[in-house]
Amino acid sequence: MTLPEAGGLLLATIARLITGAQGHWYGAPPKAEQRIYFANHQSHFDWVLIWAALPRDLRAITRPIAARDYWTSSKLKHWITREIFNAVYVSRQRTDDEDPLEPLMEALRHGDSLVIFPEGTRGNKGDPAAFKAGLYHLAEAFPDVQLIPAWIDNVQRVMPKGEVVPVPILCSVTFGAPLTLQPAEDKRAFLERARQAVIALRSVRT
Amino acid sequence: MGALRNLSVSQQIGLLFVALFGVLVIVTAIAFSRTLRDRTDEQLLAHEQFKRDLRAIWIGAVLFWVAWIAGGIVSTLLFGVVSFLALREFVTLTHTVRGDHRSLLLAFFAVLPLQYVIVATEHFDVFTVFIPVYVFLAIPVISALGNDPKRFLERTAKIQWGIMVCVYGMSHAPALLLLDLPDYRDRGAFLVLYLVLVVAVAQIAQESATRRLRRRPAARAISRSFSWRAWGLGVLAAGFVGTALYWATPFKPIPALVAALVAGGSGTLGEFVMKGIKRDAGVRSWGGKASVTGAVGLLDRVAPLCFAAPVFFHSVRWYFGL
């Protein structure tokens, strides 16, 4: 086992110890198909939680998006995001000649799966904010990639804004049925439908 | 039975090993042979439930045995881990807010490990007062510093309760290992096993009695199943098993019966109390289907032990004048 693998296993174990990181799959089984998971965003912990909730063989092919300026600012941060998570780096400053989605498209062309938080920023307890257009553009460019909505529950209690040490509280990630872009579907309509699909998972109980 | 008492420690351990795992193997074999028959959906559901419980008992028995072989420190550590998982479940289903964050950190990362360190180092005078006296003050102080007066008493009380049940109560089980009883050196693990078995028997007997008797519940809004007669039968079953096992304990038959009645009775009453808490939190069980968070239901299984252990521990200490 290599060091990044061991580090990943350790991180996933810690995440499971603290949050349980239970994944519930409704509508799509956890399979190694190419997917874009999109979820509500409440905490810095969200990505680790989704990642730990995935089965181990899916973790290796599922990548997060990381802000380049922050996550490459120190050696450790860079190492964790590059070696353990295999993150896709994007720059937050927008330049005219560069499409901000290009690194994501590149990863999708490689056949990797992605986890994105289409709200763009961390929200607080209520409903998720309106989704940014990126999800739509990815869906348009890659019609064969499954779009899986996910609802992350309880994580804001684990680490409220401004705290650094997480409290052990059980969290769950509910994965829903895949969404597809309808032919000639309006951008706003699609984004709203995607947002509703995420919200709907909040009340899924079986 | 008297002859069993005169066996050496290792012979008794061997005997218990054969008995415990023998029964488990037989039950598992019967359960498996039953799956070969055709059955209705309802039966299948009940069978699934039974299989889940059986698996939990297997895991518990194996872990227990490993801990026993490895000695007192490892068992204490094991109970500490169970305590942690139980407290995690308890806190998940009580609504805590931002202002509680620091108190929760204190509970999980300071109080819990300290309590088990105190147990492992055999500081019995500190062990019984650490949480009720010192932590009782520390938690609300930290909570008050969180600067949120909304439902303050309720929130603090919930954290205190979580600590009392999941940490304080649970820690009395490994503490039994370290009690220095007359003519009972190195046999503390028998006493823990005795306690666990007796409480489990009370629980199972009460449950099956409830199903057969269908008595009027004692408090319908809290629990639809708890009735005094079923409870009494559960306690009696615990007493019966406890007396049959007296040779493994430091007790004579009659005190063994009384100890089993006390442990079984307090365990099942504790379970009844937990039902009230669950109703308050709006769930039917800590794990399983109604749970938002996918708790594994560990608390359901260990709660009776958490209530029975302190009562049993102090009864034993009092009886032997320690």
Image: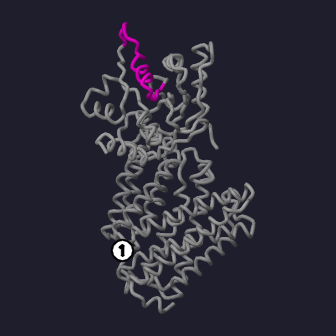
Residue B199 x, y percent position in the rendering: 55, 71
Q: Nearer the viewer, residue A21 or B207?
A: A21
Residue A159 x, y percent position in the rendering: 42, 39
Q: Residue furthest left?
A: A75
User: Residue at left 47%, top 92%?
Assistant: B3
Q: Is residue A100 magenta?
A: yes
Horizontal side of B101 relative to B246 (left or right) equals left
Residue B241 x, y percent position in the rendering: 57, 79
User: Residue at left 28%, top 30%?
Assistant: A78
Q: Give the vertical position of A120 relative to B83 (above or below).
A: above
Q: Give the vertical position of A13 relative to B306 (above or below).
A: above
Magenta stretch bounds: A94-117
Is there any visible trace of residue B265 in the rendered image?
no
Q: Which residue is mark 1?
A: B178
Q: For the C terminus of chain B, which image quadrant?
A: bottom left
Tag 1: Cα neighbours inside 10 Å, few (<14), some, or many (≥20)? many
